[in-house]
Amino acid sequence: MAPGAPWSSPSPVLAVLLFFSLVLCPAQAIVVYTDREVHGAVGSRVTLHCSFWSSEWVSDDISFTWRYQPEGGRDAISIFHYAKGQPYIDEVGTFKERIQWVGDPRWKDGSIVIHNLDYSDNGTFTCDVKNPPDIVGKTSKVTLYVFEKVPTRYGVVLGAVIGGVLGGVLLLLLLFYLVRYCWLRRQAALQRRLSAMEKGRFHKPGKDSSKRGRQTPVLYAMLDHSRSTKAASEKKSKGLGESRKDKK
Amino acid sequence: MLLLLLGIIVLHVAVLVLLFVSTIVSQWLEGHGHATDLWQNCSISAGNVRHCFSSSTNEWLQSVQATMVLSIIFSVLSLFLFFCQLFTLTKGGRFYITGIFQILAGLCVMSAASIYTVRHSEWHLYSDYSYGFAYILAWVAFPLALLSGVIYVILRKRE
């Protein structure tokens, strides 16, 4: 743009800068992912998964915080903290000596395991991740339900029984037909060898056919067909030869 | 000859109808103003209002449902295979596949009804109950399916 020219349109340099800032440097925010709800049985252990997405590289100052809000309670207490490569586990509260850190910041995983569940552990757990300089973001909540016995979802047994039995029957059928097909092929090969050995002799397999069962009609039909086509072709050639002779 | 074929097909269709009705109608157990299983649990409360809820999610009930559905599947497959084999079987051949599937259907109904008989007290708390007509139909379908399957196995194809 020439200096002194009237200001008619916004500066293209500004537009380029805006474009780059929006595309190459997206909104700086950290996004945390957890399960929505987790079921556990009394006395067993449960894993609370927490993963995140950050626009920055994982720094050494990354920190994870787990908070717990009891069911029906109003306040959330902090039960776990991880900072500067060191996990800090609750040693005085209700989760004393029950939390185990199984996460790894390099794999973007901030999961913890709670051992020896109790009914009082019902509640909401919040996972908070801060990855300086990327510190603005939404946390994610997971609700823990503790049961006496973890119920299986409806339809698992139903689907398993139907699928299993149908699959098994289909497999058996396939196996049976495969075996029968291989056996038939071997029979056909043997028959061909037999007929080749007895070539020239009009051998009729009379009484044996009834013993061999259902398969023989098919094979018998094949031999018949081959012999009949051979005879027909011979007749044709003979016929043609004769007609030519007649013409002459 | 044609009469025999018709008779066999009528028997097979009757078994199929019995299986369908027994599976679909939720009246395996009934009592005073309530009828339950396999899929729904309906009761008529005071004021002639009918409430229907889903049946329990008990694993044994799920297996009964699964085996009843399997018996229908096998019976339908058997009918379809019968017509296939009618036109493709060689002379003197037997309807083995058809018979096997029908016998499997019969065994499935039997196992469903047996499991139900033994385990139904696990998920319902009625004190006054009696077995409904759908339950009876399941037991009736079992020998008929077996008979139909055996007839297919010993039948031979002619012309």
Image: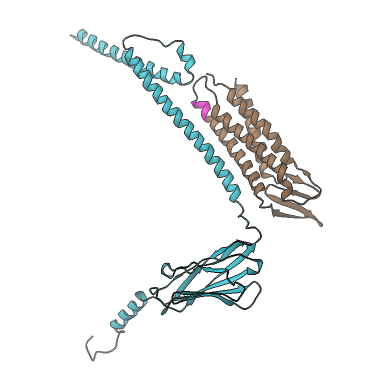
Chain colours: A cyan, B brown
Q: Quadrant of residue B117?
A: top right
Q: Position of residue B58 (x, y in %)?
A: 67, 51
The image shows residue A181, relative to residue B121, as above or below, that is above
Kindly identify the residue that appears in the image at 29 percent across and 88 percent down.
A7
Tell me if A219 is positioned left or right of B137 in this view.
left
Kindly identify the residue that appears in the image at 40 percent across and 73 percent down.
A58
**Residue interval drawn in magenta:** B84-88
- Location of the N terminus of chain A by quadrant is bottom left
Q: Say whether residue A200 is magenta.
A: no
Between residue A187 and residue B89, name the one nearer to us. Answer: A187
- Location of the C terminus of chain A by quadrant is top left
Kindly identify the residue that appears in the image at 46 percent across and 72 percent down.
A31
The image shows residue A2, relative to residue A248, as above or below, that is below
Between residue B10 and residue A81, name the one nearer to us. Answer: A81
Between residue A80 and residue A54, name the one nearer to us. Answer: A80
- Is there any visible trace of residue B21 in the rendered image? no
Q: Position of residue A101 (x, y in %)?
A: 50, 69
Q: Say whether residue B85 is magenta.
A: yes
- Is there any visible trace of residue A151 in the rendered image? yes
